[in-house]
Amino acid sequence: MKNVTILNLVLFLILTACKNDKHRDKVNNSYKEKDKKEAQFDSKKYIEYKEIDTLLLESSFKSQDSFEVFSQRFKTVNIDDAVYYVVEGDLLYDIDQLYFYYENLRNTNNQSQGNGDKLLGITKNGNIIRIQNSNDIKYAVIKSSFESEENYLKIVEYMSKATADWSAACNVSFTHKNQLDLQLYPSENPEELDFVVREYETNGAFIAKAFFPYYPKYRKKILIDPSFYSMRFNPSGVLRHELGHTLGFLHEHIRSGAPAKCPNENLSEALELTDYDPKSVMHYFCGGVGTKELELSENDKIGAQLLYGEPNNIL
């Protein structure tokens, strides 16, 4: 009788443990599904180039706002021990650049934005800004910065397509110095290169970000956030857009002809090249216009050729 009681107790404990294991598995799976859904939500949250978030901050700007109040509207990221503000969705400004941006918005608020509807290049002190070495722009994709080899290989492929598209559009030529991909540490950006490409976790503060030609050497980087791999935009198209910034092109959607829901940005350094084009590679997907493919439009090619000349492969 005693043995039967002990056996029943053992069976009870086994059944209880199994039940607890099933419950724990159910709870764990529930959390996994929740995390998965949240991750999907986050990727969608940032996928529309922040149409509902950062990009509308400029259009809601009030001239009476102090710089302190204004600066608090932007997300910040720490890159190589330096703090930057995420502006216009895919640009990083240091504190001095943000203040200059703030002053220009305050001075132009409620005024006409620009002198026309043109594809925008950049001027500095009256000089047209172009990338140096436009016929031999050298870059590396730093493999050690990527979470996986798969991610690295994807970016190599997407960069190859994006650079080829720009070279086919105007007289610029890119060289991937792939022998440096395996040699460089994530923080490196040697003088022999014009820029580097690396993966950098920002928790979705941006999908990808580039630089303008006048930036100092240490900031000439194209950064890829892991959210890049789950977005709904053409990945080569996003890099085409970012490369447009490196060549000296501003966003296309900041014109008076763009939909009201598109962001209102600083035009103080704008160089007008072609007519406003909602299908431009430099146009965000906002206000019901723009494209998720981010292809180079005919107007993009015309504007790029005005700045760099016709592609050298034209027969």
Image (spheres, grey):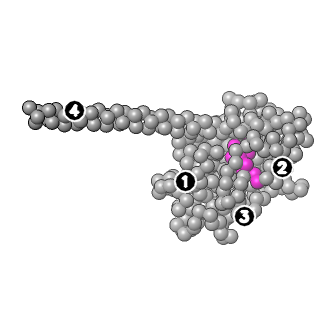
| 241 or 229: nearer the viewer | 229
**Mark carried by residue 14:** none
Neighbour tally class for label 2: few under 14, some 14-19, many 20 plus, Cα within 10 Å: some
| 131 or 76: nearer the viewer | 76
Q: Earlier in the sequence, mark 1 or mark 3?
A: 1
> For the point 71% across and 39% down, which residue is it?
54
Per the image, the residue denoted by label 4 is 12
Q: Nearer the viewer, mark 2 or mark 4?
A: 4
Q: CA distance from mark 1 to mark 3?
A: 22 Å
Q: Which residues are magenta?
A: 85-94
Examine the image and state in which quarter residue 59 appears: top right
Give the structural element (helix, strand or loop) at label 1.
helix
Answer with left or right where residue 131 lies relative to residue 143.
right
**Mark carried by residue 99:** 2
Q: Give the residue type at disc 2.
A: Tyr
Q: Earlier in the sequence, mark 3 or mark 4?
A: 4
Q: CA distance from mark 4 to mark 1?
A: 56 Å
- What percent of the width, then of the height, locates residue 73? 75, 40
Q: Nearer the viewer, mark 3 or mark 4?
A: 4
Q: Give the residue type at disc 1.
A: Ile
Q: Earlier in the sequence, mark 2 or mark 1?
A: 2
